[in-house]
Amino acid sequence: MGKKKIEKGIIADLSDLNAVKNMSSLYNLAYIGSEFCQNILPELSQIENLYLYGFKKVVLLTSFMSTSALDKNKRKISEIIHNFPDIEIIINDLGLLSYLNKTNKKIVKGIGRPLSIEFIRMDLDELSKFMNKYNISILETDELDMLKNIPSKRDFLISFHSPLKFVALNRYCSYTRKLSQHCDFQCFKEVKKIKIPKSSEYLFCLQNAYLTEKKSISDGPFDRLVKNSFYKKYVL
C-alpha cells in the first residue's frame, strides 16, 4: 500500500499576490482571506488571479464576525460563491455557517483554527455527528498532539497548519486598538514580532491574532498541509 498523498496549500498575501504567482507547481491549493479579521475578504479579481496562476483549488478564509460585519459580508461571500462555485470556505463564525447552510448548502465548508480548538477536543462520535449535521467537510488545526485522538479513517478531512501555531485572538485590531469595520489594512505592511519575557520564543502578531512559530513539518496524520507565504518577509 502506497504512502498517503497529502494536499499542499499556501496562504496568499492579499497585498502582493505576485508573491505566490509561481507557487502553483509546489502547492495544490491557494488560501486567501483571513481566519482572524472580519475586514479582510478578497476581491473577485484576486481569486480569479489565483486560478489563472495555475492553482487547482482556492480556499476562502473567513473569521469571527460582529453582527453588522456578518450582514455586510454575507453579500460579498455570496457573490464569491456565485462566481466561483467550486471554492471552499473555512468558517470561524457559526452565524456564517448557518447562513451558508441555508443559501449554499453544497459549498464545501471547513472549521477554521480559532473555532476548531473547541471541536477537536470533542468525542469523535459527537464530532462526526456535528460535521455531518452541518455539512462540514474539513477540520483545520495546528495542534499536532490532538490529532492522535482522531483515527485515520473518518468521514472528514484534517487540514494542518505549519509552522505558525495559533495562540489567541484579539477582538480589537492590534494595529489601531479599535473595533472597526473600516481600516487601511496596516497589517498588510507589517507583521509584529514580540519577544516573550523570560523565554527564547517570540509571538507573531498577524492581523487580529497572536501566533508562535513551531518546527515546520512536512508529513503527519492529516490530509492537507497549509503553510503561510508572507509572515517571514516582514519580521525576519
Image (spheres, rainbow, N blue to C red):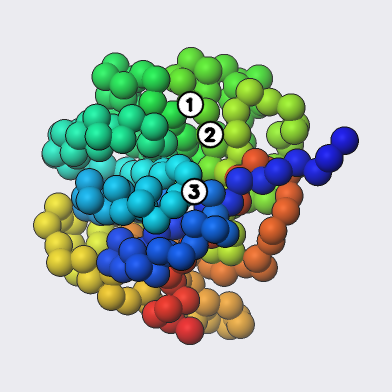
The image quarter in which residue 104 lies? top left
Q: Does 201 appear above or below 90?
A: below
Pointers 2 and 3 in contact (C-beta within 8 Å): no
Circle 3 SS class? strand
Name the amino acid type tagged 2. Answer: Ile
The image quarter in which residue 217 lies? bottom right
**Where is mark 1, residue-wise?**
136
Q: Is residue 212 left or right of residue 4?
A: left
Name the amino acid type tagged 1. Answer: Ile
**Where is mark 2, residue-wise?**
138
**Where is mark 3, residue-wise?**
29
Q: Is residue 180 visible?
A: yes
Which residue does the image show at 39% across and 69% down from the upper left?
19
In the rendering, at what x and y percent does residue 162 appear? 59, 59
In the rendering, at what x and y percent does residue 226 appear? 55, 53
Quarter placement of the N terminus: top right
Circle 1 SS class? loop
